[in-house]
Amino acid sequence: MTQMSISSETDFDQLDQLLQKPEVSGSNLDLLQQAIITGNKPAVSYLLLKNYKPVTYHPPCNEYLHLACKLDRDVMVKAIVEVGDCIK
């Protein structure tokens, strides 16, 4: 399996490559969580628009919006809200 990783510089081509690989992360974070944490707004918007849904369990609330709020990342919150109710 391939190590996945998103940085603030990850572009759409790299995201597409990551989306085609099994998710393995030493930090147990999915791609969208990594994009939020690294502040990569284009990656957050792109993953939401691609209807990215990782295989792991998700609570009934929007954990991605919660994470962005907890980290005080207004730009990420805006990106999540702009896309709408793509992820639950």
Image (cartoon, grey):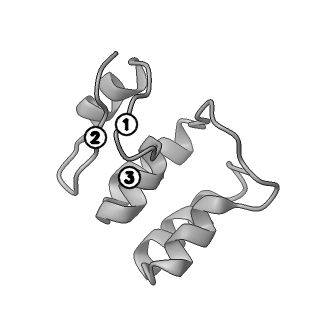
Q: Secondary structure at mark 2?
A: loop
For marks 3 and 2 on the same chain, the one whose residue lies earlier in the sequence: 2
- Horizontal side of residue 37 vs 88, given as left or right: left
Residue 33 location (% of width, % of height)? 46, 54
Residue extending farthest to the right is 60
The correct choice, above or below, for 5 with respect to 70 in the image is above
Q: Which residue is drawn at the image coordinates 59% and 57% (left, top)?
A: 83
The correct choice, above or below, for 48 with respect to 53 in the image is below
**Proximity of marks 3 and 2: CB atoms separated by less than 8 Å:** yes
**Residue 44 found in image quarter:** bottom left
Q: Work out how far the residue at label 3 is from the one at label 2, CA to CA, in angstroms.
A: 7 Å
Q: Secondary structure at mark 1?
A: loop
The correct choice, above or below, for 8 with respect to 30 in the image is below
Q: Work out how far the residue at label 2 is from the one at label 1, CA to CA, in angstroms.
A: 7 Å
**Proximity of marks 2 and 1: CB atoms separated by less than 8 Å:** yes
Badge nearest the viewer, 1 or 3: 1
For marks 2 and 1 on the same chain, the one whose residue lies earlier in the sequence: 2
Of the residues shown, which amino acid type is indicated by label 1? Ser
Of the residues shown, which amino acid type is indicated by label 3? Gln
Residue 69 location (% of width, % of height)? 55, 79
- Horizontal side of residue 16 vs 79, given as left or right: left
Question: Circle 2 is placed at which residue position?
Answer: 5
Q: Which residue is drawn at the image coordinates 44% and 27% (left, top)?
A: 23
Question: Circle 3 is placed at which residue position?
Answer: 34
Pick the quarter of the image with the N terminus.
top left
Q: Which mark is residue 25?
A: 1
- Horizontal side of residue 39 vs 30, given as left or right: left
**Proximity of marks 1 and 3: CB atoms separated by less than 8 Å:** yes
Closer to the camera, 10 or 54?
A: 54
Badge nearest the viewer, 2 or 1: 1
